[in-house]
Image (spheres, rainbow, N blue to C red):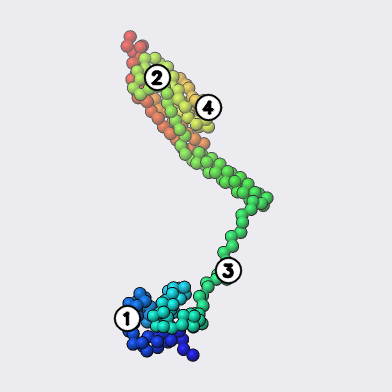
Amino acid sequence: MKLVGEVIKDSRIRKKLSREKLEKLTKIKKEFIENLEENRWEVLPEYPVVVGFVKSIASNLNLEQKNLIALLRRDYPPKVLRINPKPDITEKFTWSPKLSFITGVSLVFIVIVGYLIFQYLSFIKPPELFVEIPEEGQVVSQEKLTVRGKTDPDAAVLVNNQPTIVGEDGIFETEIEIFEGTGEVVVIAKSRSGKETTLSRKIDVELESTRD
C-alpha cells in the first residue's frame, strides 16, 4: 500500500513535472513538495497546512482530492501531547489558629531578642555627654564655677575628679573651686560597664582677688 507521498511523487513523474515546475504551479516551495513526497512529517508544517498543500497538488496533478486527503489522514502521524503527569496544583493559603499562634510566638521572640540586643549595645557603649557650662574659653573671675551638663541617667560623672550627682533625666550640676593657674575643666562620664566619655573646656582664669 502506497503512502500519500509516494502517490504524489509517482503522479508527478508520470506527468513529467519537476519539483520546480510543480512549485510554480502550486506556489508551494519545492522543499515542502520534496518533504511531502518523502513523508518527512517532522519538517512539515502543521496538519491543516499540509492538507492545503495536498489539495493544491491534487488539483494540479489531476488526482482525486478526497482519496489523497484520506491517505494523508491515514499516514500523518498523530500529534504528541505533552501532558505533565504531576500537574502543579498550588494549595490555597488559609489562615489557621496554629499559624496565628506560631506568628505570635515568633513576634514575641523577635521583640525580646531585639530588646536584649539593644540593652547589650547600650551597656557596652560609652555614655553620651554634653557640657552646657562652662563654654570653651570662658573667662572666670570667681573662685566658684558652676558646671552643668547632661549624660546618661545611669552614668557616674566626675568634674575635675569631683563626684557629681546625676538626676533621673541625666542632668548634672555642681560647683567646683577655681584656683589661679586652673586652665581647664575636665568632665568624665563613666557607664556601668566602665566605658568613659571625656569632655574638657578651656577656661581663662582672672580672679578678682588676684587683680586687687
Would you name the residue on which mark 1 appears? 21
Total tally of numbered discs in the picture: 4
Labels 2 and 3: the sequence-earlier one: 3
Label 2 residue SS: loop
Residue 54 x %, y %: 43, 78
Would you name the residue on which mark 4 appears? 169
Quick one: 186 or 106, which is closer to the camera? 106
Give me the disc on residue 178: 2
Residue 11 x %, y %: 40, 87
- Amino acid type assigned to the residue bearing label 3 in the image: Lys
**Mark 3 against mark 1, which lies toward the viewer?**
1
Residue located 40% across and 16% down the image = 143
Residue 120, compared with residue 31, is above or below; it is above
- Amino acid type assigned to the residue bearing label 4 in the image: Asp
Q: How far apart are marks 3 and 4 (CA)?
A: 67 Å
Residue located 66% across and 51% down the image = 96
Q: In this view, does 40 lie to the left or right of 212?
A: right
**Mark 1 against mark 2, which lies toward the viewer?**
1
Would you name the residue on which mark 3 appears? 86
